[in-house]
Image: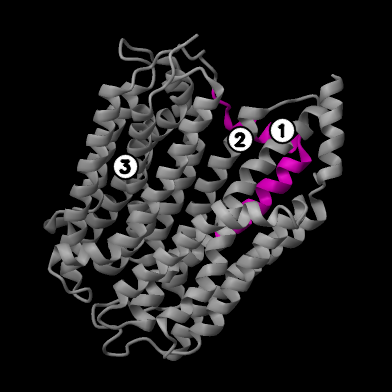
Amino acid sequence: MSQGLSTKAKWLYGLCLMGGNFVYMLTASFTVMYYQTYLGLNAAYVGAVLMVARIFDAVNDPLTGIIVAKVNTRWGKFRPWILSGSIVNALTLYALFAVPNTIQTAEGSLMVWCAVVYILWSTTYDAYDIPIWSIVPAVTDQGKERESMATIGRTFASIGCGIISVLAPVVVPMLGGGDANNYAHWIKGFKYFAIIVCIYYILSSLVFFLNVKEKHQVEEEKSPTIREMFSALFANSQAIVIVIAITAVNIGTGITGNLMPYFFHFDLGGADWNANYSLITMAIFAFQVLGMMIIYPAIRRFFNRKGIFSFALGSAIAGYALLFVMSMFKSVSIYLLFIPSFFMGVATGILNILTTVYLADAVDFGEVSNGRRDESVVFSMQTFVVKLASGISAGLTGLVVALIGLNTSENAWADGLNSAGTLLTLRFIMAAIPVIALGFALAYFSKKFILDEKKMEEIGLELKSR
């Protein structure tokens, strides 16, 4: 019997993943504002760069997976990639948020820097991210320990995203000088904040590399190609339903997440706009955890399989509708925004769980309906969809800021440089457009998804008989 995996190893795994998600969330949440608002690049250009890079990243995943699978060293298959990937990726992260002064003042050079460095960051992040999630079978061959390790990893990854979302809006200007309305303070603060994140990122990967050994040889498994992913998807009608619905959800919620800093900065404004934004972000994250840990288990007693998804989407729609209504009142209390934050956060938490559950069901459905159990291929779509949707939402965000003519200059809020019509359009797109995307997802899913309790019971019996 193989020796069990230590609690220390599991926690080091979680802390390593938290560092990786520090890096991911910093770039996902603040790259557009850093380059567009504080450095003055055209919003549509920045959004286009992020969209192209994320779509390329999604397409590039299978190739990176193949390279990782084929390389083996005396230190193992995955650990060298985790350590070297974090170091190289940390350097690109620093470069992303530490643009030299000479480049900051030259628009052409800044455009090239933004595009090249962000694409390099996106590509090198895969060299860390794919191995860190793939290493679990290599460190333990026991099912319960694998599940425990994966759960700890997912939990710490979510915590890492939450920490950056909450701390960055407050800590970054503080590191730069203390004034949240002084763009020079933000530029300097992002540089120092990136250094702190990079140090933790590399150290956590180094400690994991030195203390957690790969005990088991993982058989080389060819990563699915893009053609294989879509071939499996189109052969499985229920996988198509899930992917389309989740893509619509992620694009809608992604637009809101990207535009919300602009709403707090240039619409609500004020000297403490960043603290208010941080507070609401913290509330949404807390409600997301509440949705996963408490509300989801509770509502399973009252709703069937399709009903839980409808409940989550209904909650999200209610949250965004309330956000739109409340944003119409300039004097709205920041604490009243906790109400839509509750509905939005709970919905996100529940949907995170349901995506994995429904994809697993789609795998079983595919095996029964067409004789293909494309497990790894179907689950590859989960990462593909997240990256694709984040790229599209980033591109749309930049396009929206450019098209509505939002003035993001340093004194825009204090001097009232944005018209009432511009700000109204910002609120509408931020809150109402996601309602349309979520409404589409709800209607489409309700009509097309057939894997209810009765159907899954039939599928289970069929698979057992085989």
**Magenta-span inclusion, residue 32:** no
Residue type at tag 3: Gly
Q: Which residue is mark 1?
A: 363
Which numbered disc covers residue 379? Answer: 2
For the point 43% across and 21% down, which residue is it? 67
Q: Where on the picture, by quarter, is residue 432?
A: bottom right
Q: Which residue is mark 3?
A: 19
Q: Is residue 194 visible?
A: yes
- The residue at 46%/25% (across/down) is 136
Q: Nearer the viewer, residue 265 or 309?
A: 309
SS of the residue at dot 3?
A: helix
Mark with earlier residue (2, 1): 1
108 left or right of 376 in image = left
The residue type indicated by label 2 comes to: Phe
Assess disc 1: are there few (<14), some (14-19) or many (≥20) residues with their C-alpha within 10 Å of its C-alpha. Answer: many
**Residue at figure coordinates x 84%, y 37% from the top left:** 457
Query: Percent position (x, y) of residue 114?
Result: 29, 52
Give the image location of residue 283, x and y in percent.
Answer: 44, 66
